[in-house]
Image: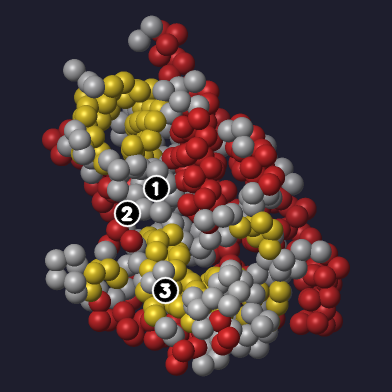
Amino acid sequence: MPDASFDVVVVGDELPGLVFASLCSRAGYTVLVVGHDSRPATYSYQGSTLHRKMPLFHALDSSPVIRETFRDAGLVAELRNRPKRLDPAYSVVTSTHRFDMRLRPEDLEQEILREFGARTQEILSFLHSLDTRSSGMGELLTQLPLLPQKGFWAKRRLRKLLERSEPWALAQNAPQFPLDLHFSSPLAALAALQSRLNSNPACPISSHRLLLHSTSGTLELPHGASGLSHLFLQRLLATGGQHWPERAVEHFTVKRKKAREVFVQRPRRVVEAKVVVGACNFRSFYNLVPQEQQDTSFHSFIKSRQPSHYDYVLNMGIPIDIIPEAMEQHTILSLYPEQQHTGPNLLRLNLARPEAPGTTKPAVVTAIARITASELPLQPEQFNDLDNRIVSALEWAIPFIRRHIIWKHSPYVTLDPDTQSPRLDPSELQEVFGTPAEGCLDLSAVPASSAYKNVIYIGEHYLGALGLEGEFLAANQAFKWVAQRIRLKRLLGK
């Protein structure tokens, strides 16, 4: 006999899972979220707070999907009061240009005029076209069902929805930044580094949405990505949901293509579930199905999905007095704008200055580089070369940084608890995929639906091409799917 029964069991507490769980709990469903060995977006090292992910957000106030989700979750006041808007939102720095994305239109125009002179109107027209083409796209995204759709009629409804959509047709032919300025690469990279899908060519829908949000501003929340997740976790708990953060799922049983019971360890408990939702690494999630109960074809497909790139994170402690006064908190550093948007020549930087005046604590620079899977070092000592290439690039923004580094640390390189020697932690890798899944409108590396009738996946790689907006959209789609499914069962008396 099971020890407990829930309408919804969420495996993993990535942001989409917590948003989805809070929506379900507020609607009256019984919900359990199992941490499943997840890790916060920040961690402590040498007395400083370091980042696993960039602690800033685009789209929080420019996406209808996100605004509606905060409203439905009862968090409108938090969205209004907690985020801090940055001005400038960020800087883009190349070997020949520096450009600050300002919030006030008149300041932005002066910045463009200073950097590009006679091309100002051409660039302003490009930025204006992003706004005009975005009209209606946010509303359309909220109407999309879980992808891919199965069955003739479901596919037909989706096709008709897109055929009738003018915003969808416009986004297929997105405007281009003037390519001859050799400044489009950093702007494209700004969008690409928010995406978990590094397809080539890039999906025009996702490129348009990410660039729109990037040019609409940047917001920060206390404690970064962990702070955003905490908001929805608190809402989940306040509405009666349960969260077991220190536990992990051992496996869940499948019978007649349906998940039946979830076995949780530390300590072991058996939980009955009507719906099981994955919000962790998708391979780890589907490996929870016992091998003898697996759908062979589906699991072969899941195993075949391998990352094309990784986002490598390097944190460094440096003296505050070597930081140039003009350096902004967030920077896109692109040494060779004409080249590919990967490798240490393209970095996304976060600068955290010590808050207390007169403190001896160092400033922390977080650098994120997207590297191809074939370039990922496999031995701890090989990371020195990658780190040195990142530091060499950083010297364009912070001269003489190399000789002043107090410490540096990547969450991917950890210490073995037994030998205290460096070792690699593959679970820290931030995977990026190169090809979308079939039927997902080029927006997702993995499908939401599975071979099992009541099992779906909505982790960060589902709709990953849309960045933060995609995570909220995934939560909304899953909530609508669950609402229809469980209500139908109740009506039938099952």
> Between disc 2 and disc 3, whose residue precedes?
2
**In this rendering, the label closer to the viewer, 2 or 3:** 3
> Between disc 1 and disc 3, whose residue precedes?
3
> Between disc 1 and disc 2, whose residue precedes?
2
Callout 1 amino acid: Val
- Element type where label 3 sits in the image: strand
How packed is label 1: few (under 14 Cα within 10 Å), some, or many (20 or more)? many
Residue that sits furthest to the top in the current view: 493
Measure the C-alpha gap from mark 1 to mark 3: 28 Å
Q: Are marks 1 and 2 in contact (CB under 8 Å)?
A: yes
Q: Are marks 2 and 3 in contact (CB under 8 Å)?
A: no
Q: Can you give x and y, in whole percent of width and height, for residue 109 in the image? A: 83, 71
Above-or-below relation of 36 to 6 = below
Callout 2 amino acid: Arg
Residue drawn at 50 percent across, 37 percent down: 234
How packed is label 2: few (under 14 Cα within 10 Å), some, or many (20 or more)? some
Report which residue position mark 2 lands on.
305
Measure the C-alpha gap from mark 1 to mark 2: 8 Å
Q: Can you give x and y, in whole percent of width and height, for residue 148 in the image? A: 45, 39
Callout 3 amino acid: Leu
Mark on residue 314?
3
Residue drawn at 38 percent across, 6 percent down: 493
Q: Can you give x and y, in whole percent of width and height, for residue 134 in the image? A: 71, 50
Report which residue position mark 1 lands on.
446
Tell whether 38 sits left or right of 141: left
